[in-house]
Image: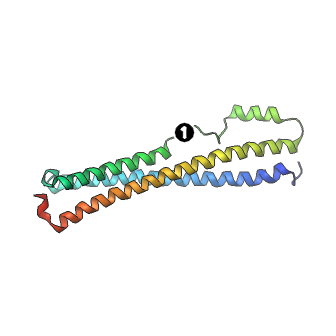
């Protein structure tokens, strides 16, 4: 196979892009797990503080209870949205062994340049699917982070209300 054959030239570039997309996917997974963990910790802390305070939610005004309920809902929604990224899915960019065997048998005709071109085309098609899935995962992660920030803001509002007038919990 000639080093300057079109299949060889594009195969190298496509292989590099596939590696970048795999790294991007790993980063998205890590960040999604962080959102799930953070949401879980904050919800646990809220319930722990409520339990440790001795006053309980019953001592809060209905507005404060509503805000805290919305905050907990936001954290659960953020975690659920982040889990959409982490849940394993079938992927078109990871062909199974029998599929690869079929491609090899179909393309093995002694013309190495054509075989390299066919493999580059297959990798390019896989790259398109991989990029689309990563782009969708990024959007879901962005939504999860925004919802988590909203939950934190709601908790902050309740904290400020309690600091301004602690008797509102009576």
> Callout 1 environment at 10 Å: few (<14), some (14 to 19), or many (20+)?
few
Q: Residue at x 32, y 55 (%)?
A: 42
> Is 81 on the left or on the right of 9, as rendered?
left
Q: Is residue 49 above or below residue 105?
A: below
Figure quadrant of the C terminus: bottom left
Q: Residue at x 80, y 42 (%)?
A: 118
> Is 125 on the left or on the right of 137, as rendered?
right
Q: Residue at x 70, y 55 (%)?
A: 16
Q: Residue at x 82, y 51 (%)?
A: 8
Q: Residue furthest front?
A: 63
Which element carries disc 1, helix, strand or loop? loop
User: Residue 53 in the image: x percent, y percent?
Assistant: 16, 57
User: Residue 105 in the image: x percent, y percent?
Assistant: 80, 32
> Is 158 on the left or on the right of 82, as rendered?
left
Q: Which residue is mark 1?
A: 89
- Rendered image quadrant of residue 4: bottom right
> Is 15 on the left or on the right of 74, as rendered?
right
User: Residue 56 in the image: x percent, y percent?
Assistant: 15, 52
Number of numbered labels in the structure image = 1
């Amino acid at each position: 196979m000639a080093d300057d054959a079109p299949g060889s030239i594009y195969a190298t570039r496509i292989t590099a892009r596939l590696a970048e997309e795999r790294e991007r996917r790993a980063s998205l997974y890590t960040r999604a797990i962080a959102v799930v963990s953070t949401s879980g910790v904050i919800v646990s802390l809220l319930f722990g503080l409520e339990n440790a305070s001795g006053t309980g939610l019953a001592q809060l005004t209905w507005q404060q209870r509503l805000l805290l309920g919305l905050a907990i809902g936001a954290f659960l929604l953020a975690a659920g949205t982040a889990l959409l990224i982490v849940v394993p899915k079938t992927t078109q960019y990871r062909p199974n062994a029998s599929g690869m065997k079929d491609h090899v048998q179909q393309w093995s005709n002694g013309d190495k340049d054509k075989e390299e071109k066919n493999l580059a085309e297959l990798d390019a098609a896989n790259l398109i699917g991989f990029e689309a899935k990563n782009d969708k995962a990024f959007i879901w992660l962005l939504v999860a982070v925004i919802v988590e920030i909203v939950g934190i803001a709601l908790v902050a509002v309740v904290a400020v209300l309690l600091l301004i007038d602690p008797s509102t919990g009576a």
